[in-house]
Amino acid sequence: MFDWDVVGGSLPAFLDGIRVTLLLLAMSCAAGFVLAVPLAVARASANRWLSTPVWLFTYVIRGTPLLVQLFMVYYGLAQFEWIRESAAWPMLRSAWFCAWLAFALNTTAYTTEIFAGALKATPAGDVEVARSLGMSSVAIWRRILLPGALRRALPQYGNEVVMLMHATAIASTVSLVEVTRVARDVYYNHLMPAEAFGTAAIIYFVLTAIFVGGFKLLERRYLRHLRPMATTAARA
Amino acid sequence: MLHGYLPMILDGLWTTLSVAAASLAIASLFGLVGAVAKLSESRVARAAADVYTTLIRSLPDLVLMLLIFYGGQILVNEITMAWELDYIDINPFVAGTATLGFIFGAYLTETFRGAILAVPRGQIEAGLAYGMTFPKVLRRILVPQMVRHAIPGFLNNWLVMVKATALVSIIGLDDMMHRASLASAATREPFTFYAAIGAIYLTITTVSILVLHLVERRFSLGVRRVDL
């Protein structure tokens, strides 16, 4: 009943799809991380003129479907003549660039909220100690606030990366040939849904397991101080 | 407004909301069964619930939806052919809501499990000791307090799910998303229409948050809070 020849024959296409999925994920995560750190600092700031615009940005992005955002960028921008005539148009027409832009903005919003939450959760004592030691505020940000917040954010950030990996399946709707698009093409060619989507499901399952495991290792490294310790008595 | 396409879009909103409401009902059912299974004494039930939540959370919604929609059709075809029944066409509404319900049931399983655990066990024992029947303990002690603990997770899942309903347009359901693409194609103004439905999704999000705040206040009557 299950046609292994179809699965075997489509494996090279699936491998290319995995490469596209991971590349889109890596590019979006990188852009999202770089944008989210300063935005999170603004979002956690006590200055309303800084925090409110960032709040609005994350609220709008997190309150609308990614599919709508992607279509606004990919199909929507062509509506404006000045965009079509601008120098950036050759780039804005490409599905790759649009998908990257939409996914990067989307993950920036979620990552900003995660980092801002972690910043706000900084124990007040940490900052007091740093001040009493005479650290400048730049040094406090660089050596106390940001490293501490990024560590605290690690478990949630790992979740966000896995969710973004799953969200890249949506790029299949704008003709990017990632894993889900390959599965849809295999399905249309052979009309065998279990083989086509089942293979994609196994690929996503394995990728998820790898990412979850990778973040567990990172947590073990960077959140070592939070692990329950064996008591000295037990060790002796 | 919107070149006269607004009524058509709002008609699609009705489909979007129906899908979301039906999926939420199915998800709550799966979530409750899953939570009870995770907390049960039976090792088989616990293992089954663990497989369910792990598997669902490892796969993209879209892939599951395509698998259930197209794969389900083949399965139904095999069954109808084997039993010599009439051909049954899987309706995208049924496939869409079933898939979303099944997916978000896994997330609600964790929400409900946490909420049940948050009710002190002694209260349930006390209820039973007073001679209440178990259904009465559920109705009078467990559920009213569980609701309060479940609200934040429930709200979160509902918000994610409303946005996920946009995916049902891909399997051919005539929801708001699909209406917007039709209107975009006819008017050549895709940005306007996608921005418009984006605004409607944002309104649903905002209204949901406000309503759930009221519900939370209702179920938190008499709970003391610490002022920090």
Image (spheres, rainbow, N blue to C red):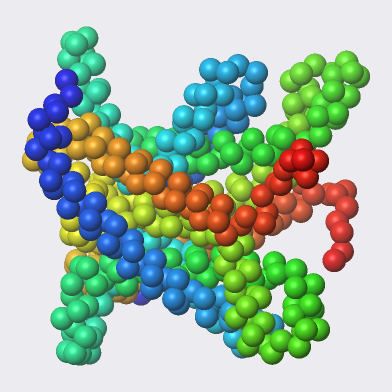
The percent position of residue A140, horizontal first and vertical second, equals: 67, 82
Q: How many marks?
A: 0
Position in image of residue B109 (x %, y %): 57, 36
Q: Residue at x 35, y 74 (%)?
A: B1
Residue B117 makes an appearance in the image: yes
Q: Could you tell me if residue A117 is visible in this image?
A: no
B208 horizontally vs B80: left or right: right
Residue at the farthest front position: A236
What is the quadrant of the N terminus of chain A in the image? top left
Residue sitting farthest toward the top: B83
Residue A44 is situated, as x and y percent measured from the top left of the image, at 64, 76
Q: Say which of A143 and B198 sits in front.
A: A143
Question: Image quarter for residue A165?
Answer: bottom left
Residue B54: x %, y % from top left:
47, 36
Say which residue appears at 53% left-offset and 70% top-offset.
A112
| Image point (29%, 42%), residue name | A203
| A188 lies above or below A137 | above
Using residue A8 as the reference point, say whether residue A88 is left or right of it: right
- In the depicted view, which residue is nearer to us: B195 or A67? A67
Image check: B176 left or right of B152?
A: left
Q: Residue at x 78, y 84 (%)?
A: A133
Q: B80 and A7: which one is in front? A: A7
Q: In the rendered view of the protein, which quadrant contains the C terminus of chain A?
A: top right
- Say if A166 sits above or below B202 in the image: above
From what the image shows, is residue B151 above or below residue A109? above
